Image: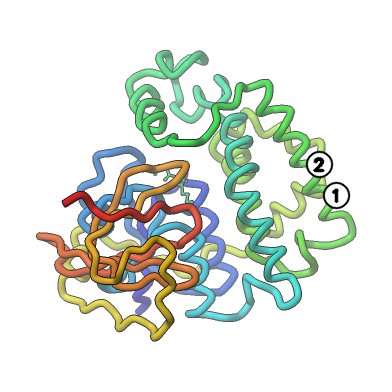
């Protein structure tokens, strides 16, 4: 039985990125469905404040952000690799572009009035105020998360998204995946915003027709599948964390960039999207990630891990 637990919800693009990596690496996993908007008491019992989707749980270790989750899955199952030899830097930089620039242009396009109305179906096109209670609550929830994500108008989003799709089409000219004949991290990151267009706001999916080789690549990506999934409950996931001991930290050097010693009470929060902080004791700050220890009334003592890139480390206010 697998001990990989993904906390996610079906229409989350970043979750689709991880679900397909489970497929590519043929991993078994447990699925816990979390709410799309706050409040998320069960998720926060595990993360300590982080509320973005998805996060990965392995016993009493919680991994936030898909960039870190991908590293954990690569370590667990190195083949097929997400980071091909000779293209490691390029693959990660392309993935970062896709998770940020492509994602926000695509989502602004997807949530153009027609797409948003479909997503919150039965509701009329118009601004969030006309989507009805679910759409309105969703719009307000996401607005509070946008610390430094520029708003893109539907017109600008359409123009940008179309240009990005043409660039992806250029990359796929003569090869099956973005950097060669096998999918890598760049493919998984570029796929998920387009997957949302195609499956969650299908009334907007005509935009993909201008780039048929992108559509064919999307079919190849979807064919990777989602691995072997088994349903699990949030209550059981929290109980499992409480009954588990976090794994011993790898012996990696402490890289101090902030003048904050290990053992300090700190907060970590998203720098551009999702400012909800997680507070805990800093127990590791390696080249690539931070680890915090925190104790929760329901989940017990957990280690919560974050990537360095995209997260703001601060000393907690006394
Ligand atoms: N950089 C993060 C981005 C995750 C993200 O923005 N996820 C969206 C859903 S796909 C989200 O958290 N939305 C708010 C929520 O689910 O509460 C990652 O790679 O995991």
Q: Is residue 110 above or below residue 62?
A: above
Percent position (x, y) of residue 18?
51, 60
Residue shown at 44% from the left, 57% from the top? 65
Q: Is residue 101 above or below residue 248?
A: above
Percent position (x, y) of residue 258?
39, 61
- Compare residues 97 and 12 and report the one nearer the observer: 97
Q: Is residue 276 left or right of residue 211?
A: left
Residue shown at 20% from the left, 77% from the top? 244
Percent position (x, y) of residue 306?
40, 62
**Which image quadrant for residue 249?**
bottom left
Q: Which element type, helix, strand or loop, lies under badge 1?
A: helix
Percent position (x, y) of residue 109?
62, 29
- Compare residues 160 and 290 and report the one nearer the observer: 290
Q: Is residue 273 left or right of residue 180?
A: left
Q: Dot 2 corresponds to which residue?
A: 166
Q: Dot 1 corresponds to which residue?
A: 170
Residue lying furthest left: 297
Residue shown at 52% from the left, 15% from the top? 125
Residue lying furthest bottom: 251
Q: CA distance from mark 2 to mark 1?
A: 6 Å
State whether residue 79 appears in this view: yes
State whether residue 56 appears in this view: no
Cβ atoms under marks 2 and 1 closer than 8 Å: yes
């Amino acid at each position: 039985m697998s001990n990989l637990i993904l906390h996610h919800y079906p229409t989350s693009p970043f979750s689709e990125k991880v679900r397909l990596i489970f497929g590519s690496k043929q991993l078994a996993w447990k699925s816990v469905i979390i709410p799309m908007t706050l409040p998320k008491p069960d998720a926060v019992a595990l993360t300590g404040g982080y509320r973005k989707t998805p996060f990965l749980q392995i016993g009493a270790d919680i991994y936030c952000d898909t960039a870190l989750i991908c590293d954990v899955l690569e370590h667990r199952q190195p083949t097929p690799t997400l980071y091909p030899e000779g293209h490691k830097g390029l693959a990660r930089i392309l993935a970062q572009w896709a998770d940020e620039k492509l994602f926000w242009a695509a989502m602004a396009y997807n949530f153009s009035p027609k797409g948003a109305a479909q997503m919150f179906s039965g509701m009329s096109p118009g601004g969030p105020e006309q989507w009805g209670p679910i759409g309105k609550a969703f719009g307000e929830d996401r607005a509070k998360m946008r610390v430094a994500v520029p708003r893109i108008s539907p017109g600008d989003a359409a123009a940008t998204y179309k240009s990005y799709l043409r660039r992806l089409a250029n990359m796929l000219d003569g090869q099956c995946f973005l950097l060669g004949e096998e999918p890598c991290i760049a493919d998984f990151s570029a796929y998920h915003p387009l997957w949302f267009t195609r499956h969650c706001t299908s009334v907007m999916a005509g935009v993909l027709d201008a780039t048929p080789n992108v559509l064919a690549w999307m079919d190849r990506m979807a064919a990777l599948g989602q691995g072997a999934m088994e349903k699990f409950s949030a209550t059981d996931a929290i109980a499992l964390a409480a009954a588990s001991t976090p794994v011993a930290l790898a012996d990696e050097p402490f890289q101090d960039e902030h003048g904050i010693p290990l053992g300090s009470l700190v907060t970590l929060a998203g720098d551009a999207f999702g400012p909800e902080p997680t507070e805990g004791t800093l127990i590791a700050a390696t080249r690539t990630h931070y680890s915090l220890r925190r104790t929760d009334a329901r989940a017990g003592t957990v280690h919560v891990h974050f990537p360095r890139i995209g997260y703001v480390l601060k000393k907690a206010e006394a």
